[in-house]
């Protein structure tokens, strides 16, 4: 995801990139970015710093603990984190802006993601909204008054993904229990509330696409779903059921594949 976000910034800006695995940054270098050999080198002299990392612990390791962000430099973080993480990072760096995105690789490439921009600083929020506008689809760029609010918005969006995915999985089980074939089940879902998820993952379910590589991994959505549980004051049973499905796939070795693995490699009904 970070590669696609940076690619949009390359259109109008001079971009320096760093990745733990240097080979993963090569497509951006080929597109005109400068490659840094360390996070410190990447942010040296930067007017704005963007991060897109796997999760909050990685943010702490790469950014917070080494005090990476230069004084006064806006830091825009697209990592999926909890509201408490966002508060922690905003307390640590007063220029912190949370910029999580909603969508997968296709919308990222097309510039049609949903984007939340969260900071209490009105002027900074407007500046960053202008910068990330190329990421967002029409009416999908939303400014909010805190990093924690942006983090909450992202978890709400991914809650919809996780629970709809679990819904499609259970719909397949229910249909199969009544001896309905997969193609017919998918057709029946066309007039249901699960149509969005069915359409998104149908090519995986019918094996027209392989889950490796995918658009959004089991590991990533499972991590996000656990952040949802941690952030809620009450039980989230639908989210918990999705987590159990994701963990089943992880135990089978499909964690780094598309989350549609929960349909493709489900046990028979």
Image (cartoon, helix red, strand yellow):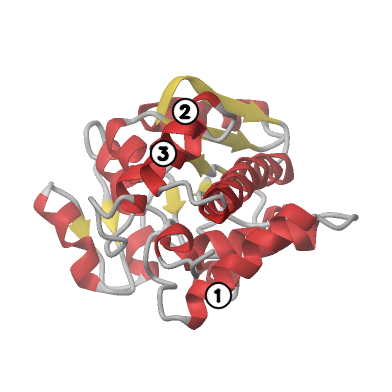
User: Residue 232: x, y in percent?
Assistant: 83, 54
Tag 2 residue? 190
Q: Nearer the viewer, residue 47 or 90?
A: 90
Q: Which quadrant, please, contains the C terminus? A: bottom right
Residue 61 visible within the image: no
Residue at 61 percent of width and 40 percent of height: 157
Disc 2/disc 3 C-alpha distance (Å): 10 Å
Q: Quadrant of residue 160?
A: top right
Mark 3 sits on what residue? Answer: 184
Residue at 62% in and 27% down? 143
Tell me the mark number nearer the camera, choosing from 1 and 3. Answer: 3
Please give left or right for residue 14 compared with residue 69 in the image.
left
Mark 2 Cα-neighbour bin, 10 Å: few <14, some 14–19, many ≥20: few
Residue 248 marker? 1
Q: Secondary structure at mark 1?
A: helix
Foreground residue among 139 and 7:
139
Q: Is residue 65 above or below residue 6?
A: below
Vertical placement of residue 36 versus 180, above or below: below
Q: CA distance from mark 1 to mark 3?
A: 26 Å
Residue 233 at x, y = what percent? Answer: 90, 55
Mark 1 and mark 3 lie on one chain; the one further toward the N terminus is 3
Dot 3 lies on which element? Answer: helix
Left or right: 229 with respect to 173?
right
**Proximity of marks 1 and 3: CB atoms separated by less than 8 Å:** no
Q: Would you say the residues marked 2 and 3 are in contact, meaning their CB atoms lie under 8 Å apart? A: no
Task: Residue at 52%, 24% (x, y): give it.
Answer: 191
Q: What is the crowding at mark 1: few (fewer than 14 residues within 10 Å), some, or many (at least 20)?
A: some
Which one is in front in this view, the residue at disc 2 or the one at disc 3?
A: 3
């Amino acid at each position: 995801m970070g590669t696609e976000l940076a690619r949009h910034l390359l259109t109008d800006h001079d971009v320096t990139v760093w990745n733990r695995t240097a080979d993963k940054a090569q497509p951006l270098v080929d597109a005109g970015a400068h490659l840094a050999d360390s996070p410190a080198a990447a942010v040296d002299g930067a007017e704005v710093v963007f991060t897109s990392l796997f999760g909050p612990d990685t943010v702490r390791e790469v950014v917070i603990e080494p005090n990476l962000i230069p004084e006064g430099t806006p830091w825009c973080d697209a990592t999926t984190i909890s509201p408490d993480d966002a508060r922690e990072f905003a307390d640590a760096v007063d220029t912190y802006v949370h910029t999580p995105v909603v969508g997968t690789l296709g919308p990222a490439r097309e510039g049609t993601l949903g984007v939340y921009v969260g900071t209490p600083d009105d002027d900074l929020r407007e500046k960053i909204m202008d910068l990330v506008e190329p990421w967002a689809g029409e009416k999908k760029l939303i400014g909010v008054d805190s990093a924690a609010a942006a983090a909450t918005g992202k978890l709400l969006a991914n809650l919809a993904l996780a629970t709809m995915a679990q819904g499609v999985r259970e719909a397949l089980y229910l249909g199969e229990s009544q001896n309905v074939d997969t193609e017919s089940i998918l057709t029946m879902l066309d007039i249901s509330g699960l149509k969005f998820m069915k359409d998104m993952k149908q090519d995986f379910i019918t094996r027209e696409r392989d889950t490796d590589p995918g658009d959004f991994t089991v590991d990533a959505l499972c991590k996000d779903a656990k952040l949802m549980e941690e952030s809620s004051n009450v039980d989230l049973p639908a989210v918990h059921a999705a987590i159990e499905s994701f963990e089943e796939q992880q135990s089978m070795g499909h964690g780094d594949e598309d989350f549609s693995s929960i349909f493709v490699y489900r046990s028979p009904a």
